[in-house]
Amino acid sequence: MTFENLLSPINIGSLKIRNRVVMGAMGSGTAHDNATVSECECAYYAERAKGGVGLIINEVTRVNNETGVMMPRQTSAATDDCIPGLAKLAKAVHFYDGAIFIQLHHPGRQTDNMAIGGRATISPSGIKSMLTQAECREMTNAEIKSFVQDYINAAERCYKAGIDGVELHGAHGYMLNQFISPLTNKRTDEYGGSTENRARVVKEIIEGIRARVGRDYPIMFRISADEFLRESMFPFSEDGLLLDEAVEICKYLVPFGLDAINVSAGIYETMNQAWEPISFNEGWKIYLAEAVKKAVDVPVFGVGVIRNPEFAEKIIAEGRVDGVTIARGLLADPDWVNKAAAGAVDDIRRCISCLNCMDSMIANGMKGEPFACAINARAAREWFYNDARQDGDGRLVVVIGGGPAGMEAARKLSERQFKVVLFEKDGELGGQLGLANKPPHKDKINWLIDYYKTQLTKLGVEVRLNTPATHNAITALNPYAVFVATGSESIVPQSIKGVKKAHVCTSTDILTGKVQLTGKKVAVIGSGMTGVETAELLETQDNEVFVVEMADRIGPDASWQSFSDVQARLIKFGTVFMPAHKLIEIDEATIRLEQSNGQCLDLVVDNVVLSLGVKADQTLADALVLHFDRVVKIGDTAQIGRIANAVETGFVAAYQLV
């Protein structure tokens, strides 16, 4: 497939970009501590420009350093001392013939109070975010006028720095979204009430930028064309911004000088419609961009789990959108565009929608560290992992285990020109991925398995399936190093009375199909992601499921977005959630649970499924240390973790081997 539409150039105002792929903004946490552009940030975006992206939109960029801070190491365009760094960023992207817009942003009520010294956040009407619960106050009319100037001033700094254009962030519940949405704008002055009044602040920003830098400087507007409040797990008595009004807002704003529109959806309270978990289908919200495109005469870009160039080509060819916006897909594979152009689609490392990027944005961002991609360990760390040396010189390395850690290590070692022999005791590569893909809606995991299979074949890795790694087999190869990724095994606490009974199994037994249950009352013990995903699988197999958790709430350590996605479906099934209940005994027909008040409850069930975590299998690794000079533990063998941990440890160990 040639992707002639996807790869054709397009004009955004006076700017011609080389193809129809826009890198959507994501807060990367790569700036300096003082919010100026860093070498890390330049390397991150330059890598995507080098990978062929037509237009890069950098990320949420501050227009005000006092009231508009979302997280540490967030890029700023709020002061003149930011201009040299922005110029450096433009130069880095232009070096690879890419184009870059700065996304101008203010979080409004979605600001973290602690990020602005404990002060109240500001918003059009002082309405708190249900998610953040940050203290919030209503802006005065004078503050709004000053706020408009913040955007205009920031845009002028971008212009002076040689940045190609700006995107006004009016989506995802941030400040401009708060003005245009009837959910968050209850004002009765010139900035509230009618659709035009609520859009006035955006109009004034556009007009101000035009007056300051002229008509030829490109301006894009990002909008959540539907806030999807009806899909929220929070209680709402109104619909907020819906598609029909969003279309009217776009039609109203374009004549004032908009050059393009970037259509998304959702706010913090409907986060899964903004940044989708794994269950969402490719292109599910393209219809929003399609509706906007029919109403305006400027380019419209659509977003929504776009992972495959074939799909992107199709929706552009059909005239549904003028181009596609891809964020996480380019985090996972910065060469997505170049691989498509070369006809090497099988080489694309497609984002699996695991949301590690979002989880790490929150966890790492507050610590002043860059976010991370689960399947691309170099993402946002290109400045550090910058040595593409090929110094393996054919030295042989044994990798034991064909899970994500072992496959990633084998891939990177082979790139470095080591000779790799991979032992896998089972008949298929995948390891824990072969369990992760079994629950409903988890088929994207197969993309990662397929990617590794393709890469290992192309790189010439010798894969020995159905072959346990014995001491004699390894010794016969005389390896330079041995990487051990033997993974983990389910925890089965022997302290629980009755845990060895025949009707007790682990989540692994259910996911592998070793144990198959239908029409049973089943207690799943443990409500981590594996537990609730196993519960969903059991529900689809016509079982009545109870999810038991000793902590005070269900899913205490799970990713909030992914967990809430599964939980919503379990609620529809009628799954019973039992937090603050500790399993203490298993009998033939009941389980005894101790409640937080010390009282005991007997629950009648047919089967018990333990999902209490896993423990590392280090037996082989510890034995090999006695016989080989270089034995490296990776994945769960080194430290129990998720896919991100497995891939990172495999990559880093292979990168470091000397």
Image: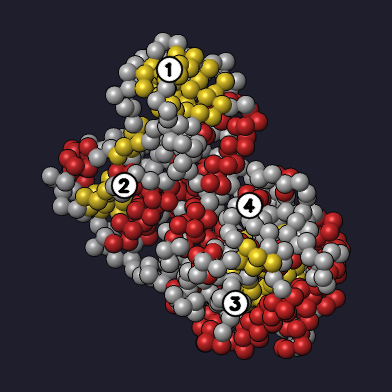
Proximity of marks 3 and 2: CB atoms separated by less than 8 Å: no
Proximity of marks 2 and 4: CB atoms separated by less than 8 Å: no
Spatial CA distance of label 3 from label 4 is 24 Å
Report the amino acid beneath label 4.
Answer: Met
Q: Tell me where residue 338 sits by quadrant.
A: bottom right
Q: Residue at x 75, y 83 (%)?
A: 208
- Which of marks 4 and 3 precedes in the sequence? 3
Q: Residues within 10 Å of mark 3 (few under 14, many from 20)?
A: many
- Which of marks 2 and 3 precedes in the sequence? 3
Q: Give the SS element for disc 1.
A: strand
Task: Residue under label 3, please give it.
Answer: 64
Q: Nearer the viewer, mark 4 or mark 1?
A: 4
Spatial CA distance of label 1 from label 2 is 32 Å
Q: From what the image shows, is residue 346 above or below residue 116?
A: above
Spatial CA distance of label 2 from label 4 is 36 Å
Task: Residue under label 1, please give it.
Answer: 591
